Amino acid sequence: MSESQQESDAAVRHFPLDAWYAAAWDHEVGRSLTARTVAGRPMVLYRTTSGRTVALADACWHRLVPLSMGTLRGDDEIMCGYHGICYDSRGRATFMPAQDTINPSATVHSYPVVERHRFVWVWPGDPALADPTTVPDLFWNEHPDWAGDGRTIEVGCGYQLVVDNLMDLTHEQFVHGSSIGHDGLSESEFEVTHTDRTVTVTKWMLGIEPPPVWRQALQDRFPDYAGLVDRWQIIRYTAPSTVTIDVGVAKAGTGAAQGDRSQGVTGTVINTMTPATANTCRYLWSFARDWCIDKQAITTRMREGVSRIFFEDEVMLEAQQRGIDANPGYDFYNLNIDAGSMWTRRIVAQMIAAETVTDEQFSSIHTGDRSR
């Protein structure tokens, strides 16, 4: 299969199944039923009384009524709200009304789940391939040397458009001119490297005027400084849909580009997008910083500031999705600035091409394991 053909197939299939996706923040899953659609798979999430997170197919084996309309029973069971069929946390039926015998085929698919870095990750693909060590490393979300917070955006666009947006930050100059935009974004050089599952885009802007958000951040730590800065953006993509961005500024000429950030401030923008359908996704993000980490006022200010910035992206991305929907079959034109996103799409296309479980096979599995 040619590279161009793989990219074309990815545009149709959209997302790999054999991957970890963040279904929710950890605090969103408790002793109640939470419905989510992950990579086209409706799921219901809850915790057992011991605190373990469970993700089951959100469709009763009997009549496909969403289990998320039911209730919890006992320590780890869920009961369908229609006819009362109960399932344990492995998805096996434990009770059927008006009969003593449990049909052995009465199961719903139980998805692999890992709780890490404040997110609940689920694996919608082949369970045998679900390796917890491959969950993206987002340690900043819970490390004591960092402080931050984030939110969730329900975006009306395909998740790859969000990845595109994050892999090329020259758009900040035009979309976010009042906060983090700067002419240097489109005037500076950048470097792109990749592996079979990652892409990194590195950009430095030396001796520039700081944009408003970064001027204030640097003055949190150095109140009397009002000079030029060296600014960096190091974008790291982990397939299929997680992007962390190492961002910051330091006093110009103090060695930040050589590794000494002692005269600056550093933040990490954590982004992980979970496709729901072909043209909708859940975008979980947070911003963690390494300066003044005991100041809740700064945490709140940065969270609200990033929220406003991301709302500007949301408006642009949803408008782009409407443009795509209105022009089916249209192939994007690419510029040099798109090098990073082009690599992400190639990696996703290769992941999809390598999967052995077809959509049809998986559909029969996840609704009741009847094929087993």
Image: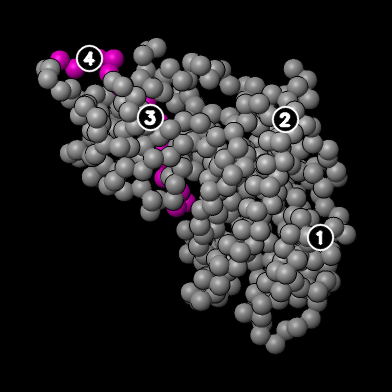
Q: CA distance from mark 3 to mark 1?
A: 45 Å
Secondary structure of the residue carrying tag 1 is helix
C-alpha distance separating marks 1 and 2 = 32 Å
Precedes in sequence: disc 3 or disc 1 = 3
Assess disc 4: are there few (<14), some (14-19) or many (≥20) residues with their C-alpha within 10 Å of its C-alpha.
Answer: few
| Range drawn in magenta | 101-119
- The answer to whether residue 198 is seen in the rendering is no
Query: What residue did someone put label 4 on?
Result: 103
Report the front residue among 313 and 24: 313
Q: Nearer the viewer, mark 3 or mark 1?
A: 3
Q: How many other residues sit within 10 Å of disc 3, few (<14), some (14-19) or many (≥20)?
A: many
Question: Dot 1: within a 10 Å radius of its alpha carbon, few (fewer than 14), some, or many (20 or more) residues?
Answer: many
Vertical relation: 344 (above or below) 364:
below
Q: Residue furthest top?
A: 371
Q: Tell me which corner region of the image, top left, top right, bottom left or bottom right, holds residue 61.
A: top left
Residue under pointer 1: 185
Q: Which callout, 4 or 2, points at the residue further toward the start of the chain?
A: 4
The mark nearer the N terminus, 2 or 3, is 3
- Magenta segment: does it hold 355? no
Q: Which mark is residue 328?
A: 2
The kind of residue tagged 4 is Asn
